[in-house]
Amino acid sequence: MRLSTTTALGLSALTALALAGCSTSTPTGSSAAPVRRGGDSAKASAPLSSAELGTRLLDEDDLGEGYTRKADAAVRGDDVSVIGCPALAKLGGDTATGSSLSFPRKAKASFTYAGSSSSEVSEELYSDNATKLSTGIGKIFDAMASCSSYQVASGSSIIDIGARKTTAPNLGDEQWSQLLTYSAGGQRSVVKQTAIRTGNVLVTVSGSPALVDAHITKALHKAHAAR
């Protein structure tokens, strides 16, 4: 079963980072069940457009000195095949038929820190009704959580992935966080992904764990600053 790189929310961002360049690190990996908080905010608000979301992405001024925005990556023609994780492979069939995981309202920005390809951070914003956002991102994190290790084939590249749950920050209405260890070509990199949903906006920050931890709160605040 194949998982399209344009619709697999978690895998698309994380695999892109892994393929961009692995660096030597200690192993980790992860998936986390969502943490839900009371008082869902802005539940009835209309979803934001992609253009509106684009104005709420972090930029170099927000991140500080040493960050450079990367050019948008070209759309890859290769599909991503998941090997050794039935739940995640099965999810590919759902996305291929146009499930709620392919949120149409979205914006993305990626940055390198101090010119190092191994120190990267990527932010994605999505907007839809709260239930669709929660269900969509929850499916991916739950699927990843079901397998401690699996492989991803992207074109001619095979990546070994280890996954484990990590604690999400106590922000927003729902939170998910995971660490993934990528091994490919004798190299290894650790990528963290944290997703926070507040009302009808989902904020995901992926990349080097320290950079994700440093900027997730700032990303959430900017995403909702104009409300």
Image: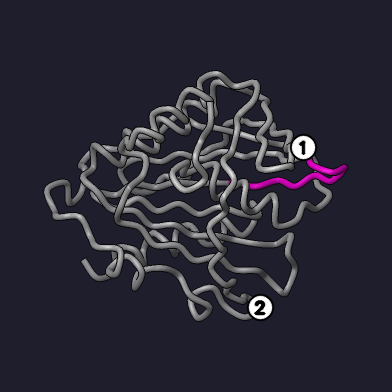
Badge 1: few (under 14), some or many (20 or more) residues near its Cα, within 10 Å?
Answer: some
> Where does the image place residue 63, in percent across and percent down from the top left?
54, 73
Main SS, magenta region, reads: strand
In this rendered view, identify the residue nearer to me: 105 or 216.
Answer: 105
Question: Depth check: 56 or 36 in front?
Answer: 56
Report the coloring of the rendering.
one colour
Disc on res. 186: none
Which residue was labeled with disc 2?
A: 66
Residue 162 sits inside the magenta stretch? no
What kind of element bears circle 1?
loop
Residue 173 lies in quadrant: top left
Give the residue drawn at x 21%, y 45%. 129
Left or right: 15 in relation to 90: right
Q: What's the residue at 62%, 40% (across, down)?
A: 179
Mark 1 lies on residue: 27
Residue 210 relative to residue 197: left or right: right
146 up-or-down from 191: above or below: above
| Magenta stretch bounds | 184-192
Give the image location of residue 191, x and y in percent: 65, 47
Q: Position of residue 93 (x, y in %)?
A: 43, 27
Residue occupying image coordinates x 65% and y 21%: 84
Q: Which residue is outermost to the front?
A: 77
Residue at image position (57%, 78%) is 64
Q: Position of residue 216 (x, y in %)?
A: 48, 57
Task: Give, as a three-letter code, the residue at label 2.
Answer: Gly
User: Residues at badges 1 and 2 in contact (C-beta under 8 Å)?
Assistant: no
